[in-house]
Amino acid sequence: MRQYLDLCRRIIEEGRWVENRRTGKRCLTVINADLTYDVGRNVFPLVTTRKSYWKPAIAELLGYLRGYSSAADFRALGTRTWDANANSNRAWLENPHRKGEDDMGRVYGVQGRAWRRPDGSTLDQLRGIVEHLSRGIDDGGEILTFYNPGEFDRGCLRPCMHTHTFSLLDDTLYLTSYQRSCDVPLGQNFNQLQVFTLLKLMARITGHRPGLAYHKIVNAHIYEDQLELMREVQLKREPFPSPRLEINPDIKSLEDIERWVTLDDFAVVGYRHHDPIAYPFAV
């Protein structure tokens, strides 16, 4: 929680204004931010200086792990985070590759579960990583990436959190996640929960202990219409201790995640928080 607030202060104190062409809004921006989450000790990085909604973040992660490409499938899991980008993004609505309502195209989990080879076949990156780690193999390339420049025109949004590298030392699994761009007041709360949960799940299904999760953000920013709420409200609140994330012990394999896991299989324990803050969302 402290490192999140420190990043917010750094953006306000050191950031420079950048015009965001996609949204038409200015952002106060810094380059390079590094955060660390202690998954082994179960210190769940859920923001406490405002009420934060963790369920949509985990639902979105589950959709990625399943390779979903429809906002309707994400809604069925418990999150509406892809509704706007699938259905209100003008460039995507005019894109000839869009298949219709709720279609997201070949973004995020689609790349992770069905990366296209030159011969037209697909590669399931995630399954290969799970198989390696389950056998205790780490060849320095246990990398899950959603970033495919060759198919940017076939999706509604370039991935922001784009690459996850898993590292195995003895019996402890670590994760380093890379994010090219981050809306810190809104997006980062989602992203840091997903980094944490991804390591916790991957350690569980591959039979290892979770260690630390490292989260690198290249472009960290606060939109101009979010700045006053951040500076005058959220940063003046004292954070509460971090809660814990509990996961159903029956989740033991990638197939479990694909077939039956729902939000009912996750619980946050000990979450104290301040009142919600209605930050504007940029599409």
Image (tube, rainbow, N blue to C red):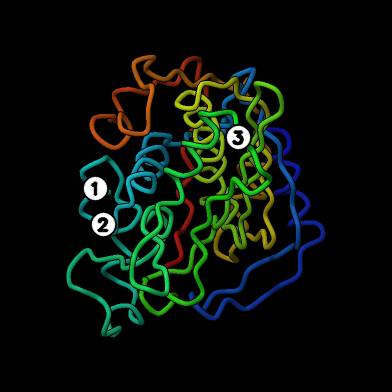
**Rendered position, 145 above or below 39:** below
The Cα atoms of the two marked residues, 3 and 1, are separated by: 35 Å
Q: Which residue is mark 3?
A: 137
Residue type highlighted by circle 2: Ala
**Rendered position, 158 above or below 1:** below
Judged left or right of residue 155, residue 230 is right
- Callout 1 environment at 10 Å: few (<14), some (14 to 19), or many (20+)? some
Q: Which residue is mark 2?
A: 71
Instruction: Pick the residue in front: 22 or 195.
Output: 195
**Rendered position, 129 above or below 51:** below
Q: Which residue is mark 1?
A: 75
Instruction: Pick the residue in front: 54 or 148.
Output: 148
> Contact (CB < 8 A) between labels 1 and 2?
yes
Residue type highlighted by circle 1: Arg
* Of marks 3 and 2, the one in the foreground: 3
Mark 3 or mark 1: whose residue is earlier in sequence: 1
The Cα atoms of the two marked residues, 1 and 2, are separated by: 6 Å
- Location of the C terminus (image quadrant): bottom left
- Quadrant location of residue 6? top right
